[in-house]
Image (cartoon, rainbow, N blue to C red):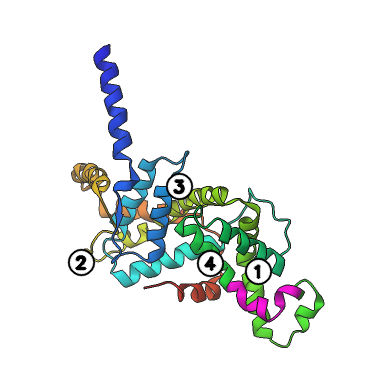
């Protein structure tokens, strides 16, 4: 009995050590900067509900699924899908009673300045990007009159269209920033990142499915001792997987991709293009 208890105790310790995200490093030459911010955020604000093992599993899946994509295509896929996810996120758990106005922007800026040590780098990136997108409209006065008929009579039609798109895709983020305290905002982003990693891992399966037969394999996106064991476990079962016909594998992958539930992004492409241009190379 004592031996059983000791064994279980050691297994728990091993599992805890194995699931330590601090041992994961990002290959900065293979992934866009925003992923570095995301991994750093998860290390500083871990989830209480989403186990570290699950995060590691998603990172391993991304390593495998994107291993045959070069840096340019990896960056485009991860960046575009990340921004689509952020812009189209539905804030079901947050109340939005605040009107978007210069006063609200000012409140966010003051809170940001007072709590810079609390916000993670990823949270700062989100806040800075959103505020910067609305800065031109503070200057041209659209934030003052967007709820009135004057907006539709404005001479700068293109500016009005750009402003409306930002209200649609970023207005909810402004409300989240003003309604949530710094720590709560960090925790909210942790929950959002979990869903983002699930989405990226699922959607990236299509690249593994359609990779060329003799494709070049590129460096991993993520490195670390934690990534070795899960990869080894997968390799142990690879011989069994090889007995499955290519047609079966293709059918399973297609089914998995079709089951991916993503928000409608038809109207987000122009705004995404503008945001992608801001990302450091």
Residue drawn at (36%, 57%) of the image: 205
C-alpha distance separating marks 2 and 1: 43 Å
Q: Position of residue 144 (x, y in %)?
A: 75, 74
* Left or right: residue 186 compared with residue 215: right
Name which quarter of the figure residue 71 lies in: bottom left
Quarter of the image with the C terminus in it: bottom left
Magenta span dominant secondary structure: helix
The Cα atoms of the two marked residues, 3 and 2, are separated by 36 Å
The reply to whether the C-beta atoms of the residues labelled 3 and 1 are less than 8 Å apart is no
SS for tag 1? helix
Residue name at image x 38 percent, y 65 percent: 33
Question: Does residue 137 appear left or right of residue 59 in this picture?
Answer: right
Which type of secondary structure does the marked residue at label 4 adopt?
Answer: helix
Q: Is residue 43 above or below residue 98?
A: above
Question: Which residue of the protein is positioned furthest toward the front in this rendering?
Answer: 114
Percent position of residue 238, x then y: 21, 46
The answer to which of marks 4 and 1 sits earlier in the sequence is 4
Q: Which mark is residue 128?
A: 4
Q: Which residue is mark 3?
A: 45
Q: Are marks 4 and 1 in contact (CB under 8 Å)?
A: no
Magenta stretch: give its range.
133-144
Binning the other alpha carbons within 10 Å of mark 1 as few (below 14), some (14 to 19) or many (20 upward) gives some
Residue 153 shows in the view: yes
Return the residue found at the far right: 149
Identify the secondary structure beneath mark 2: loop
Q: Is residue 50 left or right of residue 239?
A: right
**Label 1 belongs to which residue?**
167
Residue 101 appears in the rendering:
no
């Amino acid at each position: 009995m004592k031996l059983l208890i000791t064994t279980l105790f050691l297994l728990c310790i091993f599992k805890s050590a194995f699931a330590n995200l601090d041992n994961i490093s990002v290959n900065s030459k293979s992934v866009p900067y925003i992923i570095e911010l995301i991994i750093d955020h998860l290390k500083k604000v871990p989830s209480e509900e989403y186990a570290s093992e699950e995060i590691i599993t998603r990172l391993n899946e991304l390593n495998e699924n994107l291993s045959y994509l070069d840096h340019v295509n990896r960056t485009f896929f991860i960046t575009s899908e990340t921004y689509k996810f952020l812009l189209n996120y539905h804030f079901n758990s947050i109340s939005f009673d605040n009107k978007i106005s210069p006063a609200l922007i000012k409140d966010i800026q003051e809170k940001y300045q007072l709590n810079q040590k609390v916000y993670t780098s990823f949270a700062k990136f989100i806040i800075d990007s959103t505020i910067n997108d609305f800065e031109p409209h503070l200057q041209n006065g659209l934030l003052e009159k967007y709820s009135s008929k004057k907006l539709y009579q404005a001479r700068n039609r293109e500016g009005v269209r750009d402003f409306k798109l930002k209200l649609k895709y970023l207005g909810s983020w402004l409300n989240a920033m003003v309604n949530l305290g710094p720590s709560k905002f960090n925790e909210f982003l942790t929950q959002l990142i979990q869903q983002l990693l699930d989405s990226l891992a699922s959607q990236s399966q299509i690249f593994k499915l359609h990779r060329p037969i003799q494709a070049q394999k590129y460096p991993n996106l993520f490195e670390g001792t934690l990534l070795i064991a899960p990869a080894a476990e997968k390799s142990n079962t690879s011989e069994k997987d090889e007995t499955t016909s290519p047609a079966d594998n293709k059918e399973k992958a297609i089914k998995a991709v079709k089951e991916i539930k993503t928000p409608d992004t038809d109207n987000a492409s122009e705004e995404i293009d503008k945001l992608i241009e801001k990302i450091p190379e």
